[in-house]
Amino acid sequence: MARLFLGLDSSTQSLTGIVIDLDARKVVYEASLNFDKTFPKYKTYNGTLRNSDPLVVHSPPLLWLDALDALLLQMQQEGVALGDVLAVAGSGQQHGSVYLNSQAKAVLAALNPNRGLASQLHDCFARPTAPIWMDSSTAVECNEIRKALGGIAATARANGSDTFERFTGPQIRKFFKRQPDDYAETVSIGLVSSFMASVMAGKIAPIDYGDGAGMNLMDIRKKRWHPKAIKVTAPGLSAKLPPLAESWHVIGKVSPYFPKKYGLNPDALAVVWSGDNPCSLIGLGLREEGALAISLGTSDTYFGYMRKLHTDDRGEGHVFGAPTGDYMTLICFKNGSLARERIRDMYSLDWDGFNRALESTKPGNKGALMLPWFEPEIVPRVIRPGLRRINLDDRDAPANCRAIVEAQMMSMRLHSGWMKIKPKRVIATGGGSVNTTILQVMADVMNCPVYRLEVSKSAALGAALRAAHAYLKHNKQPAKWPDVMAKFTDPIPGSEVKPNKKAVAVYNKLIKTFAKHEQAALKEQASR
Ligand code: XUL
């Protein structure tokens, strides 16, 4: 019998399932259900509900449950050997929170296979919608909590991040302030990850240290709930939070609902779920210091493995728990692909034209620089957006194409300095990673080789690998991460982009000038 493991990824826009065969070292099944397309009745837009206040972004948890039923049904119909699955783990979009009432526990414990999950859990919510990571409506609460914890650096040292609007603690505080009665009715607050794990296990699941660190509620050093953070967030909160656990924690066997309904192995272990970024860390094979990933998406993210804990006193970056039991870091740069597209479109180019333009110029761009803050930027904190050019002619298309890519890469290097980790290899992911011209600038600025991987669904793959790891550990079998990951996370052969020594030297110098201009621009916005 093959040893199969199921990884699920409940992301903002879709639910993905990946099944791996641990002995064959292969992904044997992969499928995704897009929320908007598959479940139009929820009227979501990119998985989220429209709100009259653009800062408020919620999603309906019932939709995630319908998707879970639909995906498992599809797997059963397509002949996936669900009876051979030994463990299930999952990944959830980070920070989103789910508020359950007093009925939830009993309903979870007695899920009826003759009915759907959504209809059974329909009345179990103290708050029918879940604020998700795209919500930025809690600036007031962020300030209140940050102040109570002693400012930016103290907050980041206490729980791995400064307060952020999307983080769960500020979201809970806002809920308590605006809807005190509903807050009082809330018996259990979980994350997207722990809520989905609760359904899989048929009981309230713990929150793992990876996702728990994205709440502004967890002591990042001691890996337990932070008493002061909890106290200043909302009264009675401690009793509403589930326990915290390691990422390989086994909650129990899967709820009988799934074996009875879809033929899932009744002995399959239900493993805790984690956040999508901690799961991606595993799915990309990042398990040693210096291994990092740069995701070139709508926003760009820079994340990597961290052995020894360092936090960012400037409060720009985050530290989460890693599924290996160590730490991971993450920095989110708002002006990613959309900013690159703005420049591309400004000069009426397609991507080929953009690349040719980039290639026709030299590393360092003859000292021409750009600060591409089209949108308010998260890192560094830019509240007055705007494109700034330094020694850069706005009529020179090639120089502008080079300037934006160099600026983005230098900003990543500059603002990851607090991690005290020298990059050794970068895995490039996200839509923009197919662009090898951009990857060359990345390799040159970071001064290390850049690779790409085969599997694009790194969070779901990471969840499946976590399921395998937890199963092996649970059964007291060797469970070293490099062995668990072997072959699944190998780079695409021939995808290596090596740093060019001459260019590296140029950027080592240029980054100092870039930092000076960035500082000046930030100072100028503060003085206005
Ligand atoms: C990380 C974050 C996003 C979500 C996306 O802090 O907010 O990456 O996890 O799902």
Image (tube, rainbow, N blue to C red):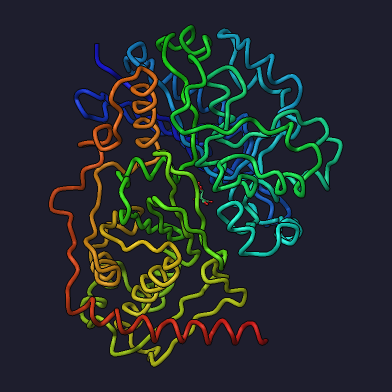
**As drawn, is 451 to the left or to the right of 65?**
left
Residue 128: x, y in percent?
72, 33
Q: From the viewer's side, name the closer residue of 329 and 39.
A: 329
Quarter-wise, where is residue 368 in the image?
bottom left
The residue depicted at 29 percent of the width and 79 percent of the height is 507
**As drawn, is 168 to the left or to the right of 5?**
right
Asked whether residue 49 appears in the rendered view, the answer is: yes
The residue depicted at 23 percent of the width and 80 percent of the height is 505
Residue 125: x, y in percent?
72, 28
Is the C terminus in the top left, top right, bottom left or bottom right quadrant?
bottom right
The residue depicted at 45 percent of the width and 86 percent of the height is 516
Q: From the viewer's side, name the closer residue of 31 and 40.
A: 31
Residue 217: x, y in percent?
65, 46
Asked whether residue 174 appears in the rendered view, the answer is: no
In this view, 495 is above or below 458? below
**As drawn, is 488 to the left or to the right of 277?**
left
Residue 457: x, y in percent?
35, 41
**As drawn, is 448 to the left or to the right of 218?**
left
The residue depicted at 28 percent of the width and 41 percent of the height is 455
Is the N terminus in the top left, top right, bottom left or bottom right quadrant?
top left
Quarter-wise, where is residue 416 in the image?
bottom left
Q: Outermost residue, left direction?
A: 494
In this view, 504 is above or below 121? below
Q: How many marks?
A: 0
